[in-house]
Amino acid sequence: MNAIERYFGINGQNTTIKTEILAGVTTFLTMAYIIFVNPNVLADAGMDKGAVFVATCLAAAIGCFIMGIYARLPVALAPGMGLNAFFTYGVVLGMGYAWQTALGAVFLSGCIFILLSLFKIREIIINSIPTSIKQGVVAGIGAFLAFIALQTAGVIVNNDATLVGLGDMTSFSPAMAALGFIVIVGLSHKKVPGAVTIGILLVALISLLTGNTQFSGIISAPPPIAPTLMQLDIAGAFDVAMISVIFAFLFVDLFDTAGTLIATTTQAGLIGKDGKIPNMGKALLADSTATVAGTVLGTSSTTSFVESVSGIAAGGRTGLMAVTVGVLFLLSLFFSPLAGMIPGYATAGAIFYVAVLMMETLKDVKWNDLTEAAPVVVVLLFTPLTYSVADGIALGFITFTAIKVVAGKFSDISIPVWILTVVLLAKIVFI
């Protein structure tokens, strides 16, 4: 026990081993929904649902262990929402690539992320990207997630006259998705631990009791991971058209992780007097390494979860909290039958809830400066309407640069933004 306390610096953070473990349990409960949601999302890409379930648990455990033991921060990781939707609906179904090739793209983005972390280039990139583009990407992915959730539940359906229309809200699927969303938001407002998981399981239970889902057990040996293990196609990802896809995976993961680390370490009171995050480099390396490991196992990008704040609120201050979450993800491997009984409409409410949270970034937009606000709206609207995060980002960059040029604000356009704008514009014109 003394060795654990010394390694994680528990006494120095005015916490205890018991507190850290309880904080880890709290964090796990708030993010356990990814065990049910991620297999459902990636199954739409043609991936084996059971294998993805195992890959999800293992990738999350690996990420948590690296973050906890190496970076020693109270931040948990798992395959990220938004990134998995882009993987399935943007790259595989939208662009027509095989899921193996999409995994190859995620692998390459993870490798680039590792290099950026090792050579400390990440700060240059983060600082060079316009704030409006960052805000637009977060909100755009949120809108994309909302659109996907509504389609999955049958709330939004095809309409030949107007492209989309409202589905039959009195039918079982839309009604259950709405119920799940309302329960999750209500419980989250009351700060109930595991609100998202409770909402998902409640809808799944109702579905089971009404005969819309067949009971297949709760505990069993983990399903085989062979259908997704080492199935990534790295060579296929070296396609000119995949450049923006790799960039999108990298871009979203990089800023999502940076934002999460800032939020969690600030909440935990770990930010130094110089304003820097402790072990930032190690934390980013943990995130990128987990992404690479996840692609080998068979899942989309692994990233830091802002739900870690719930554990920090419960007293978590050290890497032991993250390690605890990792152990719980490993134990989850034996609950695959439960995950298999979760219908798509049960997770739709959770996905829509995450989308709502991602819209918070819009409050910081400089609405009184149209040269900043317009690119945000372009990314926000074009991401779901083109069904592509990559297209949304590309059009956002191009719009930002074009507006700044016309407005005469050349100093707002950094060299990296000029380069990216030219590359993305060439892709739209010539590819």
Image (cartoon, rainbow, N blue to C red):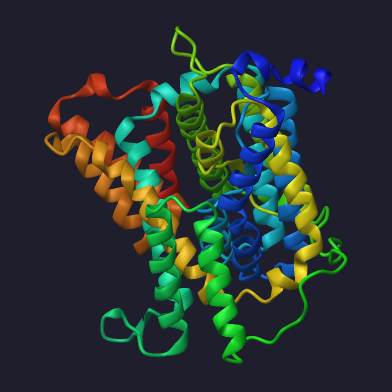
Q: Would you identify the image quadrant in which residue 287 lies?
A: top right
Is residue 299 among what the camera can see? yes
* Residue 270: percent from left, percent from top: 52, 19
Q: Vertically, is 215 above or below 315?
A: below
Q: Vertically, is 312 above or below 185?
A: above
Q: Residue furthest top?
A: 274
Q: How many marks?
A: 0
271 or 394, nearer to the observer: 271
In the image, taking residue 367 as reference, residue 157 lies left or right, namely right
389 or 408, nearer to the observer: 389
Instruction: Look at 61% across and 24% down and name the residue there.
Output: 116
* Quadrant into which the N terminus falls: top right
Q: Vertically, is 56 above or below 279?
A: below
Is residue 234 among what the camera can see? no
* Residue 381: percent from left, percent from top: 30, 56
Instruction: Look at 21% across and 31% down and name the residue there.
Output: 404
Instruction: Look at 59% across and 26% down and name the residue there.
Output: 317
72 or 130, nearer to the observer: 72
Q: Vertically, is 205 above or below 24?
A: below
* Residue 106: percent from left, percent from top: 64, 46
In the image, taking residue 139 as reference, residue 110 lies left or right, namely right
* Residue 384: percent from left, percent from top: 37, 61
Q: Would you identify the image quadrant in which residue 336 lies?
A: bottom right
